[in-house]
């Protein structure tokens, strides 16, 4: 069973004309469109995103493995119960979040930089420039 809804759209000619944008401009924004910035518009924040993922994942998984090995050794080699595995996971997540704090702040800097007017824009080149550039 289908239902039909009738919608009437009234357009006032005195209204300002509606500006239409292409799909790419809607996706990346008018000021950062590929027409203006070239192909760099698509991978501008890729380095900081990858750095953030790499630091968090490496620190979390590495610390989880170390923690579980130590807890298994303290448990005389017996398998760990669920609550001990969960506790190791929580501690490993906290360690990963602590290690990931500087790359995460650089990701936020680069995202906020894209919304600033041109006179206040920092123009970060990559993730490391955003990490160590302090103004």
Image (cartoon, rainbow, N blue to C red):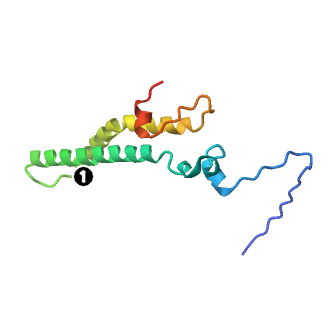
**Neighbour class for label 1 at 10 Å: few (<14), some, many (≥20)?**
few
What residue do we see at 38% from left, 47% from top? 53
Place residue 94 in its image quadrant. Answer: top left
Any part of residue 83 in sight: no
Any part of residue 45 in sight: yes
Residue 25, image x and y in percent? 65, 51
Q: Is residue 6 above or below residue 21?
A: below
Q: Is residue 64 above or below residue 132?
A: below
Element at label 1:
helix
The residue singled out by tag 1 in the image is 82
What residue do we see at 62% from left, 29% from top? 119
Apparent side of residue 65 relative to residue 73 in the rendered image (left or right): right
Q: Residue furthest top?
A: 135
Residue 42, image x and y in percent? 54, 51
Task: Return the residue nearer the eye: 5 or 52.
Answer: 52
Task: Return the residue nearer the eye: 128 or 104.
Answer: 128
Apparent side of residue 100 relative to residue 73 in the rendered image (left or right): right
Residue 98, image x and y in percent? 33, 35
Q: Quadrant of the N terminus?
A: bottom right
């Amino acid at each position: 069973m289908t239902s039909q809804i009738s919608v009437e759209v009234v357009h006032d000619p005195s209204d300002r004309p509606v500006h239409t944008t292409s799909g790419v401009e809607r996706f990346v924004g008018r000021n950062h469109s590929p027409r203006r910035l070239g192909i760099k518009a698509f991978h501008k924040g890729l380095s900081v995103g990858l750095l953030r993922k790499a630091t968090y994942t490496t620190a979390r998984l590495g610390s989880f493995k170390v923690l579980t090995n130590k807890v298994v050794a303290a448990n005389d080699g017996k398998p760990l119960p669920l609550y001990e595995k969960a506790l190791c996971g929580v501690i490993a997540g906290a360690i990963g979040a602590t290690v990931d704090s500087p790359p995460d702040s650089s990701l936020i800097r680069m995202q906020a930089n894209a919304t600033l007017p041109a006179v206040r824009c920092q123009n970060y080149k990559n993730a490391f420039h955003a990490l160590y550039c302090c103004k």
